[in-house]
C-alpha cells in the first residue's frame, strides 16, 4: 500500500492526493454525461496553481463544449478521413527510436489494438480508430492547450506540470481524462476553427468526462517501469 510521509511523525495510509495520482490513467472512451461548467472552472483554478519558471504561467486554455466542440471535431475528422496532410506543430517523439522506448511504444500500441480487436497490419481499422481522438473519445467537452510560439523549452515543462495537475485534480471530481498530442497534427485547423492567433501553438488537447469503463479501449492497462529502471541514487547512508 502506498504511504505518505507527514512531517517527522512517521507515515500514514495513502491520502486522497495519492489516490488521485495512482488512479489517473488515459481514458479513451467516455460516457456522454455532461460536466458542469462550474466543475471545469474549479479544475482550471487548481491547474493554474501548477509551478512555472518565474511564475510566467505560459499556458492558454480553450474549453470546447456543445456547438463548438462538434464543429471542431467535424473539421478535424474531415481532415483525418479525407487524407489531408498532417503538419504537427512540433516533434513529440524522437526522430530515431532506440531501446527501451521503441519497445514500450510498441507494447502500448499492441495492448490497445488487441483490446479493440484490431489485427496487426490492419491499417484501415487503425486509421479509423486514431480518428476517435478528434471526437474527444466521446467526452462531452475537451480542452485545447496552447502557448505562444515565442516561449522556450522551459515553458514546455511548465505546460506539462499544468496538464498533469489538471488531470490529477479531475480525479477528485470523479472524472477521467486523456491528454492528446493528436490535436497538434492539425494546429492550423484548430486555430482557424477557434479563431486563434497564428502565434498560438497548439500543444495538446485534453478530453474530460465520465469514463466508460466497460469499453474495450479502457480495459488495456499499460505497465510502468520499476524505479530501478530510471533512478540512480547518489546517496550517503548516515
Image (tube, rainbow, N blue to C red):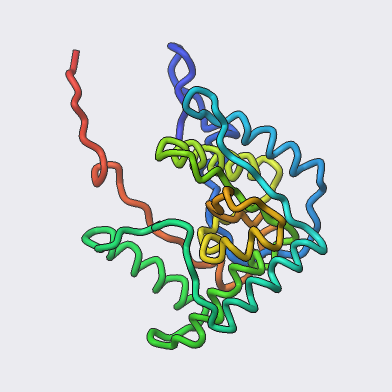
Horizontally, is 222 left or right of 200 in the view? Answer: left
Residue 214, image x, y percentages:
63, 69
Residue that appears at 56% across and 36% down: 58
Q: Is residue 193 left or right of residue 21?
A: right
User: Observer-nearest residue: 102 or 229?
Assistant: 102
Residue 141 image position (x, y, % from top left): 73, 57
Which image quarter holds the C terminus? top left
Residue 133, how many percent across, how many down?
59, 68
Please determine whether, in this image, residue 164 is positioned above or below residue 84: above
Residue at far front of view: 198
Task: Say above or below: 88 vs 143.
Answer: below
Which residue is at 63% across, 42% downward? 60
In the rendering, at what x and y percent does residue 172 appear? 66, 40
Depth check: give the residue in front, 16 or 206: 206
| Residue 109 quadrant | bottom left
Residue drawn where x is 63% and y is 71% of the image = 76
Does 199 sit above or below residue 11?
below
Q: Quadrant of residue 84?
A: bottom right
Amino acid at each position: 500500500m502506498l504511504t505518505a510521509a507527514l512531517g517527522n511523525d512517521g507515515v500514514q495510509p495513502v491520502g486522497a492526493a495519492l489516490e488521485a495520482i495512482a488512479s489517473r490513467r488515459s481514458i479513451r472512451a467516455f460516457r456522454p454525461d455532461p460536466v458542469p461548467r462550474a466543475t471545469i472552472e474549479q479544475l482550471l483554478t487548481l491547474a493554474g496553481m501548477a509551478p512555472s519558471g518565474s511564475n510566467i504561467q505560459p499556458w492558454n486554455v480553450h474549453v470546447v463544449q456543445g456547438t463548438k466542440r462538434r464543429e471542431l471535431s467535424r473539421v478535424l475528422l474531415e481532415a483525418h478521413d479525407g487524407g489531408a496532410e498532417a503538419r504537427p506543430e512540433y516533434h513529440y517523439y524522437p526522430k530515431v527510436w532506440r531501446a527501451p522506448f521503441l519497445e514500450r511504444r510498441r507494447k502500448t500500441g499492441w495492448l490497445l489494438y488487441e483490446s479493440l480487436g484490431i489485427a496487426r497490419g490492419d491499417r484501415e481499422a487503425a486509421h479509423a480508430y486514431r480518428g476517435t481522438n478528434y471526437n474527444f473519445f466521446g467526452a462531452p467537452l475537451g480542452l485545447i492547450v496552447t502557448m505562444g510560439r515565442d516561449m522556450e523549452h522551459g515553458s514546455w515543462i511548465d505546460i506539462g506540470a499544468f496538464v498533469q495537475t489538471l488531470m490529477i485534480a479531475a480525479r477528485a471530481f470523479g472524472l477521467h481524462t486523456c491528454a492528446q498530442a493528436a490535436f497538434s497534427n492539425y494546429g492550423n485547423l484548430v486555430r482557424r476553427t477557434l479563431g486563434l492567433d497564428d502565434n498560438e501553438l497548439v500543444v495538446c488537447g485534453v478530453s474530460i468526462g465520465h469514463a466508460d469503463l466497460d469499453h474495450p479501449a479502457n480495459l488495456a492497462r499499460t505497465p510502468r517501469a520499476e524505479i530501478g529502471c530510471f533512478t540512480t541514487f547518489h546517496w550517503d547512508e548516515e
